Amino acid sequence: MYLFDTDCLSNIVKKHPSPLLLKKLNVLPQEFQFSTSVNVCEIYYGAYRSKNRKRILKAYEEKVFPNLNILAFDTESGRICGRLKAGLEKKGLPKSEPDLRIAAIAIQHNMVLVTGNTRHFKGIPGLNVEDWINGI
């Protein structure tokens, strides 16, 4: 099962999305495609800051979100997130709060996190990451 980061979701609605991302999405059954409430928040935040809000919201609400299973940040993901945050800070590897929440949900559900921003998730123990945008 695969959990898609915000950059993958935004890439889908670009004028020229990543061919690799589209190819992989087309063969991956919808029941294996997930994202999180944290990513949904990031998408809405970006849309509401944009001059093209209506077009952007329409694209996500009609073409992206209906095709994904959205996972919530719950008590268990909070426990995992807190453990990760404390452990990474001790190692001098702090991460952004949203990225830690997304990583915690992926770990909780034993999913591969798909992102083009692999450096955001580098060093997070127990997290499997793949880049379907850049093919790295």
Image (cartoon, grey):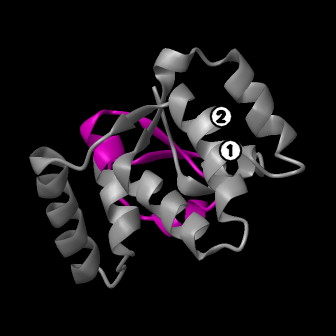
Residue 12 vs residue 27, the one in the foreground:
12
| Left or right: 116 in relation to 126 | right
Q: Which mark is residue 125?
A: none
Residue 136 in sight in this render = no
Residue most extreme to the front: 54
Residue 17 vs residue 91, the one in the foreground:
17
**Gap between marks 1 and 2, in whole Å?**
5 Å
**Vertical comparison of 78 with 88: above or below:** above
Residue 94 vs residue 14, the one in the foreground:
14
Where residue 12 sits, quadrant-wise, is: top right
| Left or right: 50 in relation to 30 | right
Viewport quadrant of the N terminus: top left
Tell me where residue 121 appears, x and y as whole percent: 47, 62
Question: Residue flagged by tag 1: what amino acid is it?
Answer: Ala
Which region is colored magenta? Answer: 105-131
**Vertical comparison of 12 with 2: above or below:** below
Question: Residue flagged by tag 2: what amino acid is it?
Answer: Lys
SS label for mark 2: helix
SS label for mark 1: helix
Find out whether residue 123 is within the magenta segment.
yes
Find out whether residue 81 is within the magenta segment.
no
Kindly identify which residue carries mark 1.
59
Residue 73 in sight in this render = yes
Q: Which mark is residue 63?
A: 2
Tell me where residue 38 appears, x and y as whole percent: 37, 56
